[in-house]
Image: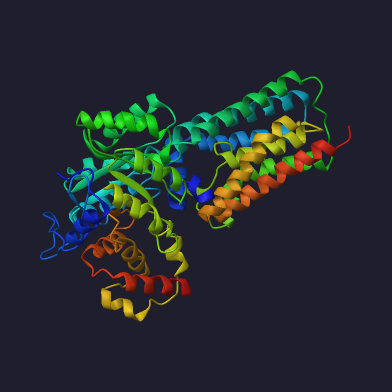
């Protein structure tokens, strides 16, 4: 177990050590060493690329779309799995995940993460039960308070469920770059394991405050919107990649953007959302890529700003 | 900003209509008959016909609130339950207004206002044909009476026929809904739906302005 008072230096040291990677047992591909990063509070290693479900898994009752998303889920687990993040706010996404797990008959490799999202205390308790029912699991790896809604009471409830063994880690989330000050305050005052916020090549405010604060507090960082809901990829349509990026194995703008995010040493896991198997493979491929150093990351920013 | 409020893709939204029609079948076919019935009522205007037409329209608003929003769209969007309540409230408003005012408000008018109303109802009844012209598959189109946009437009049509001064209180929810649909469909890139929503918004806003300025 890791000391809860682990400081920034030791946390970053651990991150650097993890960059040497570990082999996933269920990768399905020989001699691949995917990039894993530690959860500072426990030292448990998790894959650096996970999967979000906002919009992409909210397909309602449509059987064809549910089956297609199950194929994405199957490929994700087949490639080693990792964090899948959802929320009661995402419509039918949790239900669709549960459908997929049931159809596949496995959750092997899954690091389950969802959220409580309601101003009501009582409804928060119901949402935890609902998520377990919908996903078809009886224990969550991570439960977060979505967008800091009623975070004081929900964190207390989640902490209690953690002590009871129903939840392994707890955390808080924001998105779209909002409410950073409040998040920083909570990171300093509360004993939490994860924080989730937006970080991408154009929204880099997290670099100056949230990422260092998380490292200081020994809190794992989950990154949402690495592609800004696809907006950054759309912005690159028809634009050629800088020629030098082939040296670090980048073959698409999506890989360029995701590589930028996960190459920040303070990032524990990025959760790009996708509804397509080939896009998922493209994302997961980044875990075996050569990561750029700080100087190269700066070059990535400049090249991206140029387009 | 608006993208934060829409938790589904265009593909999924269109797929919802396909699933919805398969599930409620043959109600969506019967609704086309209701549309023709409303056209007939409006074309051969009478006080009783006006009241019956408004009760039918009220029932369709309630259907959209209870079934479309609270049974189907709710799967994709948690906010659908609140949209559903708004549709039910609108149905109640239409029915209450039509009933309470039954002896005073209906004023037969063979003029351009009523003719426009009949044309709008007719266009909505045949909206799948319009959608097909815009190359949208019928299974992805909003069909008369059982989907929100068609009921907004059909309501505006019946009010133009039934009321010399369509009441302001009836226009609020349709106008807000049409505005929301314009934003949603534009964000999703559903251009034929966006065109429909734009027409609905313009019609609702036009009637709103007309009812404030028309002379008795």
Q: Quadrant of residue B119?
A: top right
Residue at x 85% of width, y 38% of height = B213
Residue at x 32% of width, y 42% of height = A96
Against A28, is A136 above or below? above
The C terminus of chain B: image quadrant: top right
Residue closer to the observer: B89 or A29: A29
Q: Is residue A61 visible?
A: no
Question: For this view, does A163 lie left or right of residue B182?
Answer: left
Q: Looking at the image, what colour scheme do you see?
A: rainbow
Residue B155 image offset from top left, x and y in percent? 67, 36
Residue A165 image offset from top left, x and y in percent? 19, 31
Residue closer to the observer: A276 or A171: A171
Residue closer to the observer: A157 or A102: A157
Question: For this view, does B193 lie left or right of residue A162?
Answer: right
Residue at x 44% of width, y 51% of height = B9
Against B33, is B179 above or below? below
Residue A195 image offset from top left, x and y in percent? 33, 46
């Amino acid at each position: 177990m890791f000391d809860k008072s682990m400081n920034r230096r030791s946390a970053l040291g651990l991150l650097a050590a993890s960059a040497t990677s570990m082999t996933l047992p269920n990768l399905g591909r020989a001699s691949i060493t995917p990039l894993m990063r530690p959860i500072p509070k426990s030292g448990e290693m998790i894959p650096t690329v996970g999967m979000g479900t906002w919009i992409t898994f909210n397909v309602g009752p449509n059987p064809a779309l549910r089956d297609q998303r199950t194929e994405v889920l199957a490929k994700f687990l087949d490639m080693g799995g990792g964090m899948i993040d959802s929320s009661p706010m995402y419509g039918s996404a949790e239900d669709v995940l549960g459908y997929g797990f049931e159809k596949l008959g496995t959750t092997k490799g899954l690091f389950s993460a969802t959220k409580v999202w309601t101003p009501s205390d009582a409804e928060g308790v119901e949402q935890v039960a609902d998520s377990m029912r919908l996903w078809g699991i009886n224990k969550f790896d991570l439960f977060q308070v979505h967008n800091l809604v009623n975070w004081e009471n929900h964190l207390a409830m989640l902490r209690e469920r953690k002590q009871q063994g129903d939840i392994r880690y707890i955390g808080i989330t924001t998105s779209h770059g909002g409410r950073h000050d409040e998040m920083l305050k909570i990171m300093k005052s509360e004993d939490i394991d994860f924080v989730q916020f937006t970080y991408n090549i154009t929204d880099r405010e997290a670099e100056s405050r949230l990422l260092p604060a998380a490292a200081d507090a020994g809190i794992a960082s989950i990154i949402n919107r690495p592609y800004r809901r696809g907006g950054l990829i759309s912005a690159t349509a028809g634009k050629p990649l800088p020629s030098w990026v082939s040296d670090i194995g980048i073959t698409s703008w999506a890989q360029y953007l995701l590589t930028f995010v996960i190459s920040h040493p303070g990032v524990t896991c990025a959760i790009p959302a996708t509804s397509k198997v080939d896009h998922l493979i493209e994302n997961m491929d980044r875990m075996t890529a050569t990561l750029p150093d700080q100087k190269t990351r700066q070059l990535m920013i400049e090249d991206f700003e140029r387009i | 900003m608006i993208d934060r409020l829409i938790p589904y893709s265009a593909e999924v939204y269109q797929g919802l209509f396909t699933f919805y029609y398969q599930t409620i079948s043959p109600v969506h076919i019967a609704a086309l008959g209701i549309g023709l019935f409303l056209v007939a009522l409006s074309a051969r205007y009478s006080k009783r016909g006006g009241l019956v037409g408004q009760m039918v329209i009220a029932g369709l608003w309630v259907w959209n609130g209870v079934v479309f929003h609270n049974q189907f769209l709710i799967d994709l969007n948690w906010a659908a339950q609140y949209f559903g309540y708004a549709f039910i409230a609108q149905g109640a408003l239409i029915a209450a207004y039509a009933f309470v005012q039954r002896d005073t408000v209906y004023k037969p008018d063979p003029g351009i206002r009523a003719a426009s109303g009949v044309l709008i109802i007719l266009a909505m009844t045949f909206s799948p044909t319009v959608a097909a012209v815009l190359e949208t598959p019928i299974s992805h189109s909003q069909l008369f009476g059982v989907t929100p946009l068609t009921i907004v437009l059909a309501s505006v049509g019946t009010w133009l026929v039934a009321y010399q001064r369509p009441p302001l209180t009836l226009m609020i929810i349709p106008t807000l809904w049409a505005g929301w649909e314009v934003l949603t469909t534009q964000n999703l890139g559903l251009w034929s739906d966006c065109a429909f929503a734009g027409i609905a918004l313009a019609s609702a806003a036009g009637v709103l302005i007309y009812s404030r300025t028309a002379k008795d």
